[in-house]
Image (cartoon, rainbow, N blue to C red):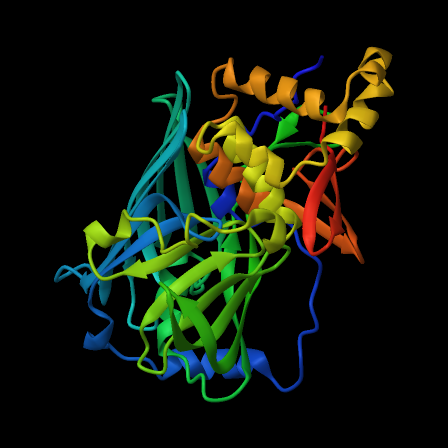
């Protein structure tokens, strides 16, 4: 009898925080470019922006996979800047990890003047180290990038106009807006594009850097679930041309509570301290009835058993052993002679006698990415990349049961 197939969940942690292509959105009415110019022209040094902020990096609904710290200080005298922003991001899931240390200088209008960063991206034994330095010169902008102590790549973009497209600028811009009503602003940022593409049938080259719109949309405060409580927070959505939007949740007191990119399963949630940032968010009680809760919870229970987080008998809550047996018998006719009860016992014995097929961290990761479609009393739950063979479930007497799993 075949063992249930559990998909490999290898992924790039850094990519989950990097925006990917998205469709264009309605630009709205009014004159957002002039509004953007007026916004930054009216900014002055603001001491209320200074201080340290700690964030927990949360996968899905509650699992902590890292921390982020952003410290805003007055810029060193003689630097020509108003603020120095020091950023540290640390993430890890299983053998994959990502570390970022960066320092940025911003002017009083929150435009970038210069930045330096060091990234370390690890996947098992493979480690990639990247050093970047970006600065504004009288002639324009310069980016220097070095990977694994190799040759430094230098790229230039003419025109030294203000650049509001980098994360430190966006973090602070989200806190200075008037969010009492819906508004839209347009500023400018740089699209460097580190990827390479074939040019005129020749060798691959990195596309030329270019200026892009930075569109900022704000909506009035609305309820936000924050660390087990309800808070009022405006949504400030910042979108760079051709990329997914990044959303910042900001209170009327200009406190940044959380931010995330598009529909990605990772969010940064503000914490009261560096220690709290490391902790999981509050979760449901351990005795939750997965079959009654919904199709996603039923599938998560299946993975929890595979990870040996729960005993194998927990499968009885969510599996329709008769339907699963009949499904597998299409490929293995010998199962036709096995009763559903015996089939269930054999499946559970197989899981009991084997090592964990997935880790608890991977269960959290899978749960955050499951794609659920409900059609009346039937549902499918798919792991990304396996849409053609999803879990199939049916609700009977208010309880969801798995009829088919990917194999």
Q: Is residue 206 visible?
A: no
| Left or right relative to 230: residue 15 | right
Q: Residue 391 occupies which quadrant of the picture?
A: top right
Q: Is residue 294 above or below residue 232?
A: above
Q: Is residue 375 above or below residue 218?
A: above
Q: Residue 273 occupies which quadrant of the picture?
A: bottom left
Q: Position of residue 268 (x, y in %)?
A: 39, 55
Q: Is residue 130 visible?
A: yes
Q: Residue 6 occupies which quadrant of the picture?
A: top right
Q: Residue at x 49, y 60 (%)?
A: 189
Q: Position of residue 205 (x, y in %)?
A: 61, 31
Q: Residue at x 50, y 36 (%)?
A: 363
Seen as rendered, the residue at the extreme left is 77
| Left or right relative to 143: residue 157 | right
| Left or right relative to 101: residue 40 | right
**375, 177: nearer the viewer:** 375
Q: Is residue 71 above or below residue 192?
A: below
Q: Position of residue 328 (x, y in %)?
A: 79, 22
Q: Position of residue 194 (x, y in %)?
A: 53, 38
**243, 80: nearer the viewer:** 243
Query: So how many labels did they put on this image?
Result: 0
**309, 216: nearer the viewer:** 309
| Left or right relative to 358: residue 45 | left
For the N terminus, the quadrant is top right
**48, 35: nearer the viewer:** 48
Q: Is residue 406 above or below residue 371?
A: above
For the C terminus, the quadrant is top right
């Amino acid at each position: 009898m075949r063992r249930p197939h559990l998909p490999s969940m290898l992924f790039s942690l850094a990519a989950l925080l990097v925006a990917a292509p998205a469709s264009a959105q309605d630009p709205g009415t009014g004159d957002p470019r002039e509004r953007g110019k007026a916004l930054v022209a009216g900014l002055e040094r603001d001491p209320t922006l200074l201080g340290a902020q700690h964030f927990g990096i949360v996968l899905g609904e509650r699992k902590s996979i890292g921390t982020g710290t952003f410290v805003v200080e007055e810029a060193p005298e003689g630097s020509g800047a108003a603020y120095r922003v020091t950023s540290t991001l640390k993430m890890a899931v299983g053998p994959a990890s990502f570390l970022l240390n960066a320092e940025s200088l911003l002017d009083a209008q929150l435009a970038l003047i210069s930045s330096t960063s060091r990234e370390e991206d690890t996947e098992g034994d493979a480690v990639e180290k990247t050093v970047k330095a970006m600065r504004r010169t009288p002639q324009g902008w310069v980016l220097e990038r070095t990977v694994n102590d190799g040759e430094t790549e230098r790229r230039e973009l003419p025109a030294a106009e203000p650049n509001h497209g980098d994360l430190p600028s966006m973090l602070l811009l989200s806190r200075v807006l008037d969010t009492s009503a819906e508004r839209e602003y347009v500023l400018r940022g740089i699209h460097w594009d580190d990827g390479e593409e074939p040019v005129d049938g020749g060798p691959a080259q990195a596309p030329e850097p270019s200026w892009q719109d930075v569109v900022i949309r704000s909506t009035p405060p609305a309820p936000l679930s924050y660390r087990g409580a309800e808070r009022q927070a405006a949504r400030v959505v910042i979108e760079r041309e051709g990329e997914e939007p990044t959303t910042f949740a900001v209170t009327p007191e200009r406190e940044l509570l959380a931010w995330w990119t598009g529909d990605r399963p990772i969010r940064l949630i503000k914490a009261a301290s560096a220690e709290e940032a490391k902790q999981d968010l509050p979760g449901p009680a351990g005795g939750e009835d997965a079959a009654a809760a919904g199709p996603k919870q039923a599938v998560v229970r299946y993975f929890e058993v595979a990870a040996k987080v729960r005993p194998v008998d927990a499968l009885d809550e969510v599996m329709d052993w008769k339907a699963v047996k009949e499904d597998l018998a299409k490929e293995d006719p010998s199962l036709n002679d096995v009763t559903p009860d015996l089939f269930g016992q054999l499946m559970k014995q197989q899981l009991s006698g084997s090592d964990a097929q997935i880790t608890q961290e991977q269960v959290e990761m899978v749960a955050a990415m499951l794609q659920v479609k409900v059609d009346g009393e039937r549902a499918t739950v798919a792991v990304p990349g396996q849409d053609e063979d999803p879990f199939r479930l049916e609700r009977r007497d208010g309880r969801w049961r798995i009829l088919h799993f990917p194999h």
